[in-house]
Image (spheres, rainbow, N blue to C red):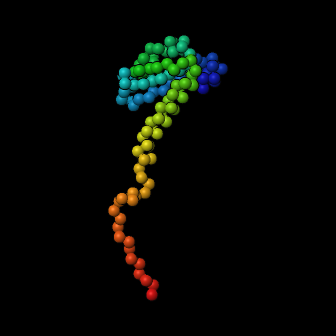
Amino acid sequence: MAGWATAHGIRYLDGAILAPTQVVGTAAATVPYSGAHEVHEAVRNTMAAVRGTGRCLGADPGRAAAYEVALLDLFTTSAASPVGRAPATTPASAPRSPPRRRRSPI
């Protein structure tokens, strides 16, 4: 996206809103962004409306997206870990029901 924007004379700043809608615009919202510093300076007042705790990750516009994906991976991995630790079978110490008797065909 940044390459396309630059090729068309568009200044580009990338970011990710990592917060539920209820906290957007408050200090609890986290909005990492990346791109040219002069672009950020040009839109500073607009960014302040949603930023909360903004953090510039550098001039490479892809860093904000990479940061977002890394955090989402961390979240889904930690949310799924209790499921992954659940036993797949019944432990040997669990009480067992008595075996069922089969009827003889004769």
Residue 19: percent from the left, percent from the top? 41, 29
- In front of the other: 46 or 83: 83
Viewport quadrant of the N terminus: top right
Query: Is residue 88 shown left or right of residue 37?
Result: left
Q: Quadrant of residue 102?
A: bottom left
Query: Is residue 61 shown left or right of residue 79?
Result: right
Q: How many marks?
A: 0
- In front of the other: 79 or 19: 79
Residue 7: percent from the left, percent from the top? 66, 20
- In front of the other: 80 or 4: 80
Residue at 42% across / 47% down in the picture?
Answer: 85
Q: Which residue ends up furthest to the bottom in the rendered image?
A: 106
Residue 81: percent from the left, percent from the top? 43, 43
Residue at 37% across / 21% down in the picture?
Answer: 27
Q: Is residue 88 above or below residue 43?
A: below
Q: Is residue 65 above or below residue 92?
A: above
Q: Which residue ends up furthest to the right in the rendered image?
A: 7
Query: Is residue 13 shown left or right of residue 86?
Result: right
Residue at 36% across / 22% down in the picture?
Answer: 26
Residue at 47% across / 23% down in the picture?
Answer: 32
Viewport quadrant of the C terminus: bottom left
Q: Which residue ends up furthest to the front in the rendered image?
A: 93
Residue 35: percent from the left, percent from the top? 55, 19
